[in-house]
Every structure is written in C-alpha cells, then in structure tokens.
Image: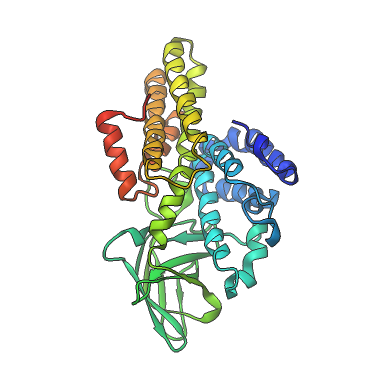
Amino acid sequence: MDALAFADPSAQSTLKDIQTYLKTVVATSANRIDQQKSLLSESLQALGNLGIFRLGVPKAMGGLGCDRRTLWHLNLQLAQTSGALAFLVAQHQSALGMILEHTEGNVAQAYLADLMQGQVLIGVSFSHLRHNPVDLQAQPTSGGYLLRGTLPWLSGFQHMTMFVAAAPLPDRRILFALMPFINAQQATGGILHLSLPLPLAAVPSTQTVQAEVVNWLVPPEDVVGVSEADWITARDRQQLLRGSAAPMGCAHASLQILAAIPEAKDLYHYFRDRWQQLYARIQGELDDVNPPYHAQLRAAAIHLAVQAAQAALITTGGSALVLNHTVQRLYREAMLYTVSGLNAPLRHALIEELRFGRGSH
C-alpha cells in the first residue's frame, strides 16, 4: 500500500517529503483542518511547496510523470489523513488536468509553471455538466465568449485565486474558461457574484460557494480550451476507479480506530479482510481501460467507507457525536464520497450495492 513502491526514482524524494508532512503535521491536526480554513490553506500551500502538483504532470512538461498507480496510492494516503485536504488537492489537480489537455492554449502558456509549483492555486466547476439542462451556458461573441447562468458547486473560496468553469457552447462542445475566484464586475457589464460559503456537513473548511454569472466576457487570454461534447462522459469513465482511492483511504482510517479498541477485535478483523480483498481487486484493475464494472468497485469502496465509519462510531460511543471527534469527521467524509462524482453508472452501482451488497465480499 506504499505509494513509493510504485514511483519513478525521480519522484521518490518528493513522495517521501509529502508522506512525512502528512504523518507529522496533517495527521495530528486533521480534525482542526476540517473546521478551520486557515489551517487547511496552510496545509494546501505546504503540499504545493513540496511539489505534489508536479507528480502527475508529464516529464516533458516539467513534471515528475508519476504513473496512475502511484497517484492512486498517494490519493489514498491523503484521504486517510484529511478528507478536506484531499478534496482541495483534487480540485487543483482537476483544474490542472484540464489545462494540460489544452497545452497550446493561452492559459497553459501563462500559468502552467506556477500551477505545477503550487504558486498559484485554482479551483474548478464542472459537475453541472451532468445535469440537463446545464446551469451555465457559453455563447461565442466577437470578443471571446459570454457566460450566463449559475455554478451550483464551487469549492476553494479564499483558498484559491482563480477557477476553471466549464460551459457548453451552442454546438454542444465544452468551453473551459479561467475566472477570478472573487466577486467581480467587468467594465463591459459582466458580473460574477459568489454566495456565502455553504454550511456543509462534510469538509466545511473547503469553503464551497455557489456563483451567479451574468454576461461574463471570457477574452481569448482566459480561454483554457474547447473540448468535444462528450467530454464529461469520457472523463467520468476514466475517473471511476481513480475515485476509489479516497473512500478506501477513509475506510482505512476507520480501521485504524477499530484496531486500537480491544473490544472491537472481531469487528476489526472483519473489516480488515473486506478492505484487503477489495484493495486487491482494485489493484488488479488500475491499468485496465475503464470497463463499465469499475463503477461496481467504486461503489463497493464507498459502502465500505460508510460501514467502517459506522463500525468505528458504534465502538466509540456517544463521544463520537462531538463535531471535532475523529470518528465524526470520518463518518461525514464517507458521506462526501457517496455523492462525489455521482454520475448515472455510479448512482446505479451504489443503489445495487445498497440493495444486494455485491461488492462487499
């Protein structure tokens, strides 16, 4: 389960530094990071300084070129340590990934180096593309593109300075636009209005807001790129198994709590065996080309996270109801993974797992 075992030698030092920071700093303050945005910002910036955002970038572009197996294990360790930190790291990585898909664009040319170094942190908003109709629309104009509509989910307010918004064009292709992560009004009359942070039950320190976009002009220099109409469908397929790392990390953190309670010995062995069996199945699939049944493996990982957290809750007792208790945090993080990246195949797999428990053994 050690990410370093799969790493290219050129990434070993960076991975060791990141793991040391997670164990010595983040693990000891994870419950406070969950509630305090200042601590979350400090940890996010520290990981950026250590080079975490270079790991998945190809070597030809100045990154460390780590393979997907290494990145999966690192994401597991992040989520095992702090769900809030793992979530914001994933936001920046997602936006960086979109920019890497359009390296010929102006945004990549202007910001890629700083994004890899963590000197500039950016968020992303694209989950609305799974809805019909889509809440945000883009219209070509002589000066670029006009954006109109709403962004229902945008995490990283006051942690990040910009974000990438995705919006369909009239021909159904997807525009990716760089926008400021502040309330703003353009000289041309465009308005970007952010709500107050939503009172989320899980990872509240990530500062998630909604945004109203009124005739916002995206000039050529802020265009990340344009992708095909099926971009979100293709991405969801690619991310099905990659997204299993976070719930597996959350489940492993609950296992560590069970292991420390003598009265929970049998329960610990039961969930440990389930975790190891599912881990082995996922490892055997990581290099495959995203078959549909990856949704079942992701669903099994999510249900395991929920059930392991519930087991830790039962064995801990009433003290776990306190907001800053580790078990309470893990229980809420398991809920987050239940709805993260929730497309139609994953929703179906989650319901089937709930009804029949097909991936539990």
Q: Is 211 left, or right, of 262 in this rendering?
A: left
Residue 345's place in the image compared with 121, above or below, is above
Residue 236's place in the image compared with 353, above or below, is below
Residue 87's place in the image compared with 6, above or below, is below
Q: What residue is drawn where x is 50% and y is 72%? A: 225
Q: Is 231 left, or right, of 23 in this rendering?
A: left
What x and y, as percent, mark residue 290? 44, 47
Q: Quadrant of residue 59?
A: bottom right
**Camera-side residue of 26 and 95:** 95
What x and y, as percent, mark residue 241? 46, 43
Q: Quadrant of the C terminus?
A: top left
What x and y, as percent, mark residue 9? 74, 42
All told, the count of numbered labels is 0
Q: What residue is drawn where x is 67% and y is 36%? A: 4
Q: Quadrant of residue 102?
A: bottom right
Residue 5 seen by the camera: yes
**Camera-side residue of 90 and 236:** 236
Return the residue found at the far bottom: 142
What x and y, as percent, mark residue 315? 40, 18
**Camera-side residue of 9 and 265:** 9
Return the residue found at the far left: 355
Q: How is the image coloured?
A: rainbow
Q: What residue is drawn where x is 61% and y is 41%? A: 70
Q: Quadrant of the N terminus?
A: top right
Residue 110's place in the image compared with 283, above or below, is below
Residue 122 seen by the camera: no
